[in-house]
Amino acid sequence: MSEHTVRVDSLPEEIVTLLRAVHDALDIPSPGLTEEDERAHALLLEQRVTDARIVLACLLHKGHEVGPAAESLRAWTAERPVTYAPWAGGGVA
């Protein structure tokens, strides 16, 4: 079996946009030191993971179009901003 190397810059732009949307949805800062920050972080991460899974499931199982799916994920991510104090390496920001 021969391996085929695929680089991001060789993918269609819509696929790269989707990958960036998934990355951005899941790339949230670590929480600050309080339990409240930790709970808010866990809830936000859970919500954003669910959003990403929904978008990917719709693409893989329902045949949805990639461009609108990426746009939906970006919109959902914007609706769920970081509201907790992020970790600032020894204290909270």
Image (cartoon, rainbow, N blue to C red):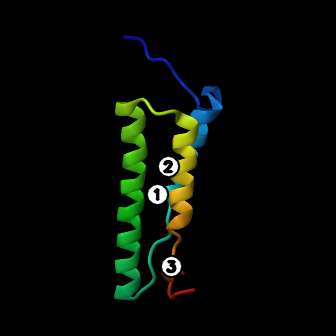
Q: Amino acid at mark 1?
A: Leu
Sequence-wise first label, 3 or 1: 1
Q: Which residue is mark 1?
A: 26
Relative depth, front residue between 80 and 39: 80
Q: Is residue 89 above or below residue 9?
A: below
What is the spatial separation of the Cα atoms under label 3 and label 1, in whole angstroms?
15 Å
Q: Which residue is mark 3?
A: 83
Sequence-wise first label, 2 or 3: 2
Quarter of the figure that contains the N terminus: top left
Quarter of the figure that contains the C terminus: bottom right
Q: Which residue is mark 2?
A: 22
Q: Amino acid at mark 2?
A: Val
What is the spatial separation of the Cα atoms under label 2 and label 3, in whole angstroms?
19 Å
Find out whether the residues at labels 1 and 2 contact each other: C-beta distance under 8 Å.
yes
Q: Residue at x 50, y 70 (%)?
A: 29
Quarter of image, res 40: bottom left
Q: Secondary structure at mark 2?
A: helix
Q: Residue at x 50, y 83 (%)?
A: 85
